[in-house]
Amino acid sequence: MSTATGARLVDFDDALTRYEPVIGLETHVELGTASKMFCGCATTFGAEPNTQTCPVCLGLPGSLPVANAAALEATIRIGLALGCRIATWSRFARKNYFYPDIPKGYQISQYDEPLCTAGHLDVEVDGETYRVEIERVHLEEDTGKNLHVGGSTGRIHGAEYSAVDFNRAGIPLVEIVTRPIPGAGAKAPEVARAYVTELREILLALGVSEVRMEQGNLRSDVNTSLAPIGSLEWGTRTETKNVNSLRAVERAVRHEIRRQAGVLDGGGRVLQETRHFHEDTGSTSPGRSKEEATDYRYFPEPDLVPVAPDAEWVEKLAAELPELPAARRARLQEEWGLSATEMAWIANAGAVDLVAGTVAAGASPADARKWWLGELARRANDAGVELAELPVTPRQVAELTALVAAGTVNDQLARQALDGVLAGEGDPARVVEARGLAVMGESDELVAAVEAAIAGAPDVVAKVQGGKVQALGALVGAVMKTTRGKADAATVKRMLEERVLGG
């Protein structure tokens, strides 16, 4: 198989017999502050283009930046949650590069003296724990957004014209950079996804960002390289830019492993470059040659004073951190009576909050786990979306389990009710009533169906009466078919026994 650019894609498992992947991630998090990093402009998502700007975030002559204290605090809290060392002295720098979405011609960032360094995050994949070392957590300002109008891809190639929206320019942006992650082998794509998933959960717990990937609050640059197994040197890395879904993070790593293996197998050389990820195909395509730090000509930002967090303040922030996701999972695992493996299944499915919300709404942990990891997980997989993206709430799932427990519907009818909920027809009870899905009681209609099944299968009746009681299942199936699954199977079995066996 070949990509659109002609490079051969190697089978994933085959590639891992010859090459060792090394991955790394640079994750950008837009903080949920009310104002921008260095000015007082609003940060509301979706506002009319260029309505949330001022001389500071547009870089007009004579304007001076002032650091956002809330953003500094949020960055330190992120660093503490990741076990980082918090700098006692830090400063901002100018990162010089010239793109249309950089109004000043440089970005205010942190370079050699970031706020947070040397942390880690442990993630679990298939029962094995992988430690992801965090190199740095630093604070900077986001860029504007280029809008390429016309064409079919939304990119500059083929566009009729381009415009720039500077509303996003200057929003506080935290960059969390891992060290290279070797040793994941065939699990590299899953480790990358698990890391971003766990990081996202931590950020949500801290309340520092909405981390809505579809809005760009959280986006990852995914670095991938391959080296021949046993090599003493790592391979040349590529950086797949702005990957904005958990599923896409995994797919980007998987594709790059297959693509780079094809390049190396063919005697070619992997180029150090940025690449674009294509959601529709799961593939990547070339972007631009990757710059080195020297290309940005960093120098200290002369208009901002250094940041020197007070040690007592940092200790206070550390003491006030909320319960973090790993600790919460351990607590819920004990409360729900689950094994470590069962809890890992819930976590890997991204269903901890969903199951917890369903239990809080009245469902048993067993029922909540059954529906989210069973029927709903299957539907999410079929639709190619995350569980949380399904149009059903934990409260609605809890209501569905209550209807089953009350005998109003059976599992088969509950799945039909779920169809209606997902289609936007309302809550489960309303769907059950509107679609007529309630379990059929011992009515004249059910009695008629039972008697018709007996009359239509005298040979089966004879077998049952001759001692082959298991043959009764055929009669139960006939009644269920006649009633389109709306009868209660236990009730049908009892009615058949009374009539065929005399009690």
Image (cartoon, rainbow, N blue to C red):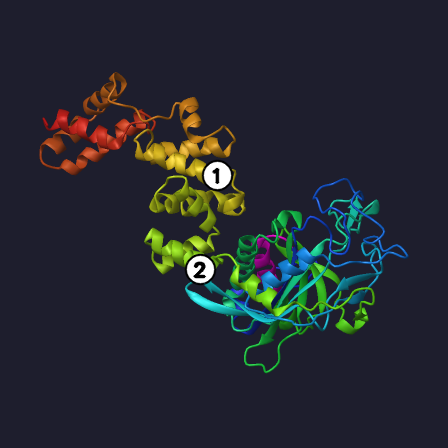
Q: Is residue 400 visible?
A: yes
Residue 254: which quarter of the image?
A: bottom right
The furthest residue to the top: 444
Q: Label 1 belongs to which residue? A: 393
Q: How many marks?
A: 2
The furthest residue to the front: 312
**Main secondary structure found in the magenta portion:** helix
Q: Residue at x 47, y 42 (%)?
A: 379
Q: Is residue 13 left or right of residue 235?
A: left
Residue 101: which quarter of the image?
A: bottom right
How much space separates mark 2 and mark 1, taking CA atoms? Answer: 24 Å
* Magenta-span inclusion, residue 136: no
Magenta residues (range)? 243-256
Q: Residue at x 46, y 33 (%)?
A: 419
Tell us which disc is closer to us: 2 or 1.
2
Residue type for callout 2 = Ala
* Magenta-span inclusion, residue 247: yes
Label 2: few (<14), some (14–19) or many (≥20) C-alpha neighbours in 10 Å: few
Q: Quadrant of the C terminus?
A: top left
Label 1: few (<14), some (14–19) or many (≥20) C-alpha neighbours in 10 Å: some
Q: Is residue 24 left or right of residue 468?
A: right
Q: Residue at x 13, y 37 (%)?
A: 468
Residue 11 coordinates in the image, percent (x, y): 55, 63
Q: Is residue 234 left or right of residue 348?
A: right
Vertical arrangement, residue 261 with respect to residue 378, above or below: below
Q: Label 2 belongs to which residue? A: 327
Q: Nearer the viewer, residue 278 or 91?
A: 91
